[in-house]
Image (cartoon, rainbow, N blue to C red):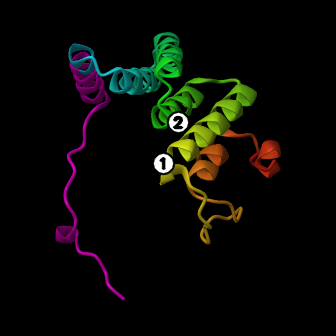
């Protein structure tokens, strides 16, 4: 059995929330200057997500909805998947959250994005899945956890 030593892994610098927001705004500005509407929509959603978790729920949620509107116009399935997942994290209403997560999964599957693919998870106490199921488990009330994904 191989045990990883610390030097086996690339060290990723830790950013503060303020730095994450600053860099995301810089990427957003660059995407606008380059006319990259797909990147602009995804970065807008990511900025919204960051703002919600920094305490600015109103602006963050507004940005996530703006990103969704942008993405529906360019119809890039991978971008839509990312944006729906970010939007779900910004929403308190659990039924809307679940709907957005499912829409995100469907869009990601259409795009061939395997990030949210269902994979068996032997360590999960609910015998659930990683990927989308892990997101659902983190955001759904216990009663809804047994509802199958459609």
Give how far across and how far down residue 82 sits, in percent: 48, 35
Verify CB contact (< 8 Å) between mark 2 and mark 1.
yes
Give how far across and how far down residue 137 sits, in percent: 66, 48
In this rendering, the answer to whether 104 lies above or below 62 is below
Q: Quarter of the image holding residue 89?
A: top right
| Front one among 129 and 21 | 129
Residue farthest to the left, as pictured: 7
Give how far across and how far down residue 134 sits, in percent: 60, 51
Q: Is residue 24 magenta?
A: yes
Q: CA distance from mark 2 to mark 1?
A: 9 Å
Q: What range of the chain is rendered magenta?
A: 1-30
Report which residue position mark 2 lands on: 81
Q: Quarter of the image holding residue 95?
A: top right
Looking at the rendered structure, the secondary structure element under dot 1 is loop
Q: Residue at x 27, y 15 (%)?
A: 32
Q: Quadrant of the C terminus?
A: top right
First-in-chain label (2 vs 1):
2
In this rendering, the answer to whether 32 lies above or below 50 is above
Q: Is residue 126 magenta?
A: no
Q: Residue at x 22, y 50 (%)?
A: 12
Report which residue position mark 1 lands on: 113
Q: Which mark is residue 16?
A: none
Near mark 1 (Cα within 10 A), the count class, few <14, some 14-19 or many ≥20, is some
């Amino acid at each position: 059995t191989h045990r990883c030593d610390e030097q086996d892994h690339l060290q990723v610098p830790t950013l503060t929330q303020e730095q994450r927001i600053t860099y995301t705004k810089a990427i957003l500005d660059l995407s606008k200057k380059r006319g990259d509407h797909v990147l602009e929509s995804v970065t807008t959603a990511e900025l919204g997500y960051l703002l919600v978790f920094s305490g600015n729920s109103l602006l963050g949620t507004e940005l996530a909805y703006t990103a969704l509107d942008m993405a529906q116009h360019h119809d890039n399935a991978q971008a839509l998947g990312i944006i729906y997942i970010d939007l779900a994290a910004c929403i308190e209403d659990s039924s809307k959250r679940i709907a957005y997560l499912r829409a995100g999964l469907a869009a990601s599957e259409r795009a061939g994005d395997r990030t949210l693919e269902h994979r068996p998870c032997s360590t999960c106490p609910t015998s659930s899945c990683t990927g989308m199921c892990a997101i659902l488990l983190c955001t759904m009330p216990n009663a809804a956890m047994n509802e199958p994904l459609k």
